[in-house]
Amino acid sequence: MTNSLYDLSAAYLAVLDGIPEEIDQQTVNDTLEAIDGAIEEKAFNIVAYAKDLEGQAKVIEAEEKRLSARRKAYENRAKSIKTYLQGTMEKLGRDKIKGDLFTIALQNNPGTVQISNEKAIPTKYLTIVPAQYVPDKKAIAAALKNGEDVPGCEFIRSRRLAIR
């Protein structure tokens, strides 16, 4: 017999399914207890391994957050010094600076529309956006729990593994 949880559970079920009548109940009980003990030990080892993986994931998540904050700091600093350079060039009236590595130029952006009073806009410049209906799952769940029939819906209770 191997030590995998799959094999242990298969052995347990095989003992239950294939008990010959000539074997006494105590032997069957002892065999099932031995397999059950191995299953419990395997289950605890699996949970310990899962906990270790979750711990590693948290360490990686913390490192991701640290690196993300560092990246944002570099991006903000780059944006800040570019804004400083643009302000200085505008103050000095310099639209272009040529160099060996870079050519720096101030350019006009394409225009954008800024709306100050939406109600004053003529209707020919407005579009209709249709309403969107989204199922209210909390209300549907409450109705189904109260025995109401909600077409197209059913209440499903699934199971999860709880480790305390």
Image (cartoon, grey):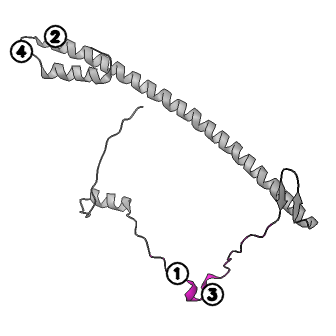
Find out whether residue 117 is within the magenta segment.
yes
Q: CA distance from mark 3 to mark 2?
A: 90 Å
Amino acid type at image mark 4? Glu
Q: Please say if 59 is above or below 105.
A: above
The residue indicated by pointer 3 is 120
The residue indicated by pointer 4 is 21
The residue indicated by pointer 2 is 27
SS class, disc 3: helix
Disc 2 or 1, which lies upstream in sequence?
Answer: 2
Q: Quadrant of residue 37?
A: top left
Disc 2 or 4, which lies upstream in sequence?
Answer: 4
Amino acid type at image mark 2? Thr
What's the magenta region? 107-130
Find out whether residue 123 is within the magenta segment.
yes
Position of residue 88 in the picture relative to residue 31 (left or right): right
How crowded pointer 3 is (Cα within 10 Å; few <14, some 14-19, many 20+) is rated as few
Q: Please say if 80 is above or below 74.
A: below
Q: CA distance from mark 4 to mark 3?
A: 92 Å
SS class, disc 4: loop
Q: CA distance from mark 2 to mark 4?
A: 12 Å
Which residue is at 79% across, 67% downward?
A: 107
Q: x, y (%) of residue 31?
A: 21, 13
Q: CA distance from mark 2 to mark 1?
A: 81 Å
Q: x, y (%) of residue 61?
A: 58, 38
| Residue toward you, 50 or 68 | 68
Q: Residue furthest left?
A: 21
Amino acid type at image mark 1? Thr
